Amino acid sequence: MENKCPAKFHNVDFCAPATHDNPYEMYDHFLEHEPLYFDEKNGVWEVFRYDDIVTIERDTETFINGEGARPNIPPDPGMIYQDGEQHSKQRALVSSGFTPRQMRKMEDRAREIVTELVDIMLHKDEVDIVEDLAAALPMRLIADMLGIPEEKRASVQQWINQIMIGGCGPDYVTDEVNDAFENFCMHHEEMYQDRISAGCKGSDLLTIWINAELNGEKLDESQLLFEHVLLNVGGAETTRSAIAGGLERLSEDPKQYHALYEDSSLIPNAVEEIIRWVCPFVNMYRTATRDYEMHGKVIKEGQMVGLTYPAANRDPRKYKDPHTFNIFRDFSKEAKHLSFGLGPHFCLGASLARLEVRLSLEEMTARVKSLRIPEGKELEYVSSSFTRGLKKFPAILEAR
């Protein structure tokens, strides 16, 4: 029988934030019936199936980052927009701030922050899980890592939130987005000059990056700026979404929440299921260096391809009951999620994100018996074609 695409899935604008509000019916349609789709409005391809995304991520000769990772937005000097040897060099320099020793320091500090945040929440009649925990933890941890002054932290978060809107595509790079980026640049320059004036003798992450050297090469000032932006975008926003989204699902399923309290050894697996389920990044883009055929269609040289990670994370070819949230899911028998990407561009901060989600689950399940949405209150979500997650999560906590 001929498949007739429902009208609502014709002429889809994948850059429009509203396209990705409650998107799973749409993703399911494309997974089954049109796994490679051309977005006419934006002139980009979209791919949905797990194996197709893996193929593209691994074929770094055919599909590159050097032309940009966001739809029709030029690349910047940051690591994420480099390919081949340049990417390897730059990633090695950036990763100097994520050594095992640094991670141990981060874990100790993150645990202190989580304990303090839950202490404060348990003294409130009503909390907002996003503001009081999910956003506060990564924001404070990254601010500590970078040595951002207390009085600047709220402003930095506001600028990053605004900058991320521009990641949806050129139509969304507004004056407000440009102003926020300019403010962040001035903030970065202040921090950079402070480190230089102090002789770069500190232990904060920006100083580590300034001092990092590989075969006589260092990160230049423009690279430092964009790695600074990327850390805030990838580290703060996505971790926030994972923590809030995971606790929201667990609040709806007391049996799974209680299971984590009864057996904390389940928490690492629950972290993976949360990250699969929430999948904060909607997509990243690659550019074809040659004509490439897939599913009977041809991606032309120079065209961009969007890798739709949330669809792949619920591909029924890879997961049993993919739309079921299950902390007991056996990832040794099912695919590992693609929320952090794959291959040479695998997210450098993945271990940090996992750490923050794990510590949040440990502290919440140990000290909070239940959490529920107050009567008359509702969840609010960020609307975006770049990153998705909860904006507000009002809750009443019951202490153990």
Image (tube, helix red, strand yellow):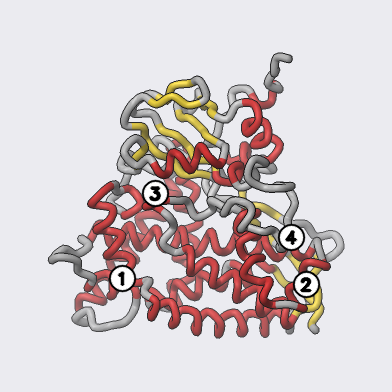
Q: Nearer the viewer, mark 1 or mark 2?
A: 2
| Type of the residue with mark 3 | Asn
Task: Please indicate whether residue 228 sits to the left or right of residue 22 in the image.
Answer: left
Q: Position of residue 227 (x, y in %)?
A: 34, 60
Pointer 4: residues within 10 angstroms few (<14), some, or many (20+)? some
321 vs 66, nearest the viewer: 321
Callout 1: few (<14), some (14-19), or many (20+) C-alpha neighbours within 10 Å? some
For the point 13% across and 66% down, the residue is 216
Q: Which residue is mark 3?
A: 178
* Residue identified by numbered label 4: 249
Which element is circle 3 on? Answer: helix
Amino acid type, label 1: Ser
Instruction: Specify whether 240 is left or right of 380.
Output: left
Pick whichever of labels 3 and 2 is earlier in the sequence: 3
Q: Of discs 2 and 4, which sits in the foreground?
A: 2
Q: In the rendering, at what x and y percent does residue 98 appear?
A: 38, 71
Dot 2 or dot 4: first in sequence order is 4
Crowd band around label 2 with a 10 angstrom C-alpha radius: few (<14), some (14–19), many (20+): some
Q: Which mark is residue 96?
A: 1
Front label number (3 vs 1): 1
Relative side of 37 to 185, left or right: right
Spatial CA distance of label 2 from label 4 is 14 Å
**Which residue is outermost to the left?**
216
Mark 3 vs mark 4: which is more N-terminal?
3
How far is the residue under mark 3 from the one under mark 2? 46 Å
Question: Based on the displayed image, in which of its 4 quarters is residue 26 positioned?
Answer: top right
Q: CA distance from mark 4 to mark 1?
A: 35 Å
